[in-house]
Structures are given as C-alpha cells and as structure tokens.
Image (spheres, helix red, strand yellow):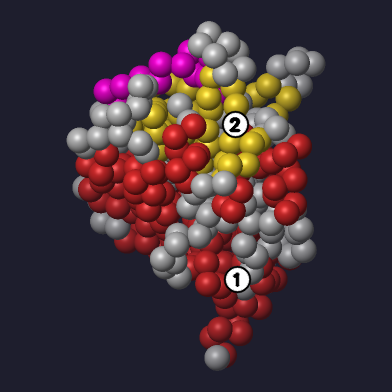
Amino acid sequence: MNLGDRSRYEENEDNEDNEEDREEGVWQIHDEEESVWETDEEDSAESVWETEDEDEGSEDEKIATIDHALSNERTRERARSSSVELLSSVNEFANQSDCILSIVPPRDALATAKRVLDAVSHGREQPLFYLELNAISPGLSTEVETLFQGNESIVLIDGGIIGGPPSPKADSPTGWKCPSLVISGPTRLPYEDLTQQLNIKHVSPKIGGASGLKMCFASMTKGFIALAIESFVTADSLGVLPELREQMKTHNPQGLAIADRGVTSMPPKAYRWVYEMQQIAATMHENGGFNKGIFDEVAEVYRVVAEDTELGLEQTEERNRGRTVEDAVDAMRTGMKKVKQE
C-alpha cells in the first residue's frame, strides 16, 4: 500500500491493511514503516506470523506469512532474504502454524482474528496459539476472546509489544537489546525457546491485562509526542520555536531529545496511530473511569498529520518531509493553513 493513499483511512471489506519494525526477519519485514514496536504495517489483515517447530525439541523454527498480504515485491524480497516463507492462502497459513502473532493496524485486529478462526481446522492434534499483539483496548481483546469461545482448536493469548526495535548492545558483540512482549490470560505459551527469543513476560491471568498495559504505556509515549507536535507548531507560529527549544535544552534536555525523536519519526506512522489513540481513550474510559476527551483529541492531532499535511505521505524507507523538527513544523503549518483556507 502506498502510504500516501488516503483510502487507507476508510473501512475496507477485505481489511487490506496492515503495523511495527521487528527482529530478525519476523519483525523487520512485518512493518515497512515502523521503527517502534507498536505498531506497525504490511498491506493486509493477514500480515500475521507463524512459528513452527520442525520437530519436537528442535531449536529450528519456521517463520511464514501470506504472499498476497505483502504490499510489494520489495517487501517480498525482504521476507525471502530473512528466510520467511511465503504461503499462498490463509487456510494454508493457519493450518501449518503452531503459533500466530497478530500484528496489524488496530482497526483490523478483530477482522484478522475472524479470518484466522474461519481458516483453522477443527480437531487439530495440537491447538493453534493465537497471540493478539495489536494495539487495542482490553475491551476489544475481550471481543476476540468471545469470538474464539467454543473452538478448542485455537487458544487466545492477549498481548502487547512495548519498547523500541531490537538493536545490538553497545557493550556486547553478540548481545541484543530487545523490546518486551507482554502477554496475559489463563494460558501461557508452551514454547520455552520462543518465549526466550521474543522476550515474553506473562503479566496477568486475565485477558485484557497485557493489552491494557500496552495502552497505558503508549498513552505516555505517543501522548507526549502529540503534545510536542502542538507545542512546537504553536511556538513556531508565535515566532519563539528556537527559544522554546533552547529553554528545553537547558531545563529539560531529556524531554527535548524524546520530543525531537518522536516528532521526526512519527510521520509514516501517524495514520494508524489515529485508531490506536481511540483505543487508548476507550481503555481509559472503560477501565480507568476517565472521560475519552483527552485521547480523542490526541487522535485528532495524528489525523491532521496524516490527512491534512504532506507528512502523511511519508514512508519510513523513503523519507522526504519532516526529517527535522523545523521541517515537520513547516509541513504541519502549511497543511493546516491550506485546509483552513479551503
């Protein structure tokens, strides 16, 4: 999918869309445009992953996705180069898998679960473990749980991905710094090797615990980025952006670094953060008792970025606009002014 295509905001009967940068082929291929684990995207609701033990006790795992779920030949080549097998259909994909990691745009989470459920063969010798890792509210995770009830061939594990993409450790030639993959629910993943490889931690016996933890974490990270966008754009309109940055450098240097990194890296991801912020709003309302207003407004900030400015055309591997704070602010002000004039 071309990230500049506005149709991605519309409901798609085929749910062709799909969210985050990941580790060692599994993750890096899954999301062309994401350098943060939340989140992330291929071109289909079928962009989920399989791990299959070649034989019991083996350390080998097969990683696969669905060929037509990948958006273009470049993505397919990245998959092949990382030894990711391209399968021809959802049925083949679901029934060859022991474990599926569902990481799609939040709006496609439920549709993805339905498609996998429809494809799973009843009476499997071993159940399929379905890790719901999308950036969704506990309430939506519960809907997936309800969907799977009564089918013993598929087991739901609630989850979320927290932290930046895998990166080599500075103090170790072979070590990696990895994000956390938190899971919850009455069932634990039975594959110890996979649990260690993906840095999985079981945090709650209830479905919704892990997805809620993810929502609370993202509220502070992506919520702050939205505040930085508004602050920088407003300061620039007042002619004091350099002074604001100087004051932050003096009094809150860590905050400035986080703001700069967030504002310049978010453009390719803004379009799917819209629904994610709405899911955070639902989480805070349904589970915390707060009004939805704050994060509905945060969602609106990202909608403006994605729909009203040139920043919404950005792709991670082909960045043009917004590579600096100043250019991101300029693109925001230009786009917002144009919309206002229209």
- 139 horizontally vs 341: left or right: left
Q: Is residue 64 above or below residue 39?
A: above
Report the residue at 60% width, 31% height from top.
63
Residue type, label 1: Asp
> Residue 290: x and y, percent?
25, 51
Read off the residue under disc 1: 5
Read off the residue under disc 2: 63
Does residue 298 appear in this view?
A: no
The disc label shown at residue 62, or none: none
> Any magenta on residue 301?
no
> Residue 8: x and y, percent?
52, 67
Quarter of the image for the C terminus: give it.
bottom right
Q: Which stretch did the figure color magenta?
A: 185-198
The crowding category of the residue bearing disc 2, from other C-alpha atoms within 10 Å (few below 14, some 14 to 19, many at least 20), is many
- Tell which tag, 1 or 2, sits nearer the viewer: 2
Report the residue at 59% width, 22% height from top.
61
User: Mark 1 or mark 2, which has the lower sequence index?
Assistant: 1
Residue type, label 2: Ile
- 3 horizontally vs 230: left or right: right
Quarter of the image for the N terminus: give it.
bottom right
